[in-house]
Image (cartoon, rainbow, N blue to C red):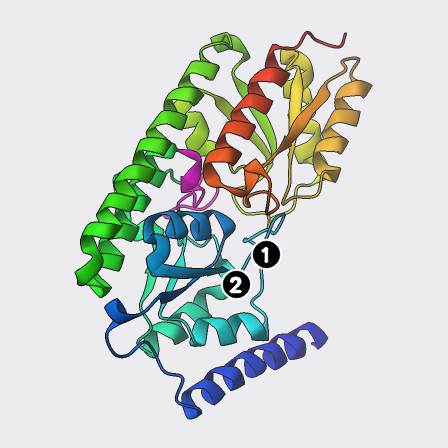
Amino acid sequence: MQRYGTAISILGLLLAVLVAGCASGSQSPSGDLSARTINIVATTSMIADLVGQVGGERVAVTGLMGPGVDPHLYKASEGDVSRMAGADVIVYNGLHLEGKMTEIFEQMQHRSIPTFALAEGIPKAKFRESPNFAGNYDPHIWFDVSLWIASARYVATSLSGLDSLHAETYAANAARYIEEMEAVDAYINARVAEVPEAQRVLITSHDAFGYFGRAYGFEVLGLQGISTASEAGTSDVQQLADVVASRRIPALFVETSVSPRGIEAVQAAVRARGFEVKIGGTLFGDALGSPGTPEATYIGTVRYNIDTIVTALLEKEAS
């Protein structure tokens, strides 16, 4: 009952902020957006980076979720709601990645604030179905560079629809950025080719890398499911340890936005089976790196991840 009361109190607080915004006249964008910088709020750091690349000098982007933040579990603060209520545009991932924010997005749409989900720009046939929940899809679309390229085009089209005077600018920015992504896609494929097919097994904290596996020929196993809201149990740890030990998989990987305890438990369980598996490194899963580092950008993160994966899988077994 206490949890229920707390949830109601938080919802009431958020709605109060929305009402206050309406009363103060801070309604959705009005006037000619072409005459000023467009204020955009993005949920994850990957989306903030993408929108900034495509929007360029025409946009000012505020990202709600910083380095190491898990969007599956993220709850919007009063400040977040206020920032969204004052934005010209809101961009989020969709496919339930930001599951705890769904009602807030709906409220913003009701206030006529343009609110876009990147998943809307990708054909449904390209989504990876959830292995655990029928009718739902894996939201981690950025791990397939080709899908992130489609998202860049969607952002350019969406911004052009709101600011047609600068449509050529958005198209040019998107084209430049797509060239960079195509180059990093080629880099990934070149690095993957260094790994024998039998060794292309990626084991991570949660099932975030399914699109990566499908695009680049990896078998991907996550300790937790697509959403970190579902915790792994002892049986999950033991089953994964059986796979690692029997197949002598050389490395496991932790993620910046997920506690390492689960993977560490798998490592210990594998050790108990007489095989020593190493932690091959920390991958950037649901968030980019810290500001000022190469991994603070999507391109930098993608390069870092593939380098970390390939290096670890090519190292000789510890025993």
How crowded pointer 1 is (Cα within 10 Å; few <14, some 14-19, many 20+) is rated as: some
Looking at the rendered structure, the kind of residue marked 1 is Leu
Percent x, y for residue 172? Answer: 24, 44
Which image quadrant is residue 13 in?
A: bottom right
- Quadrant position of the N terminus in the picture: bottom right
- Quadrant position of the C terminus in the picture: top right
Q: Is residue 282 left or right of residue 219?
A: right
In space, the residues marked 2 and 1 are separated at their CA atoms by 7 Å
Q: Is residue 51 left or right of residue 234?
A: left
- How many numbered circles does the render carry? 2
Looking at the rendered structure, the kind of residue marked 2 is Lys
| Visible residue check, residue 123 | no
Seen in the picture, residue 141 relative to 24 is either above or below; the reply is above
Task: Tell me the number on the disc at residue 285.
Answer: none
The one nearer the camera, 211 or 137, is: 211
Q: Is residue 229 found inside the magenta-colored segment of the image?
A: no
The one nearer the camera, 105 or 35, is: 35
The one nearer the camera, 257 or 28, is: 28
Seen in the picture, residue 147 relative to 107 is either above or below; the reply is above
Which image quadrant is residue 309 in?
A: top right
**Tag 1 residue:** 73
Residue at 30% over, 76% down: 112
- The boundaries of the magenta stretch are 130-144
- For marks 2 and 1 on the same chain, the one whose residue lies earlier in the sequence: 1
Residue at 60% over, 31% down: 204
Proximity of marks 2 and 1: CB atoms separated by less than 8 Å: yes
Percent x, y for residue 210? Answer: 46, 33
Q: Main secondary structure of the magenta part?
A: loop
Percent x, y for residue 34? Answer: 24, 67
Q: Is residue 142 found inside the magenta-colored segment of the image?
A: yes
Which image quadrant is residue 149 in?
A: top left
Residue at 56% over, 78% down: 11
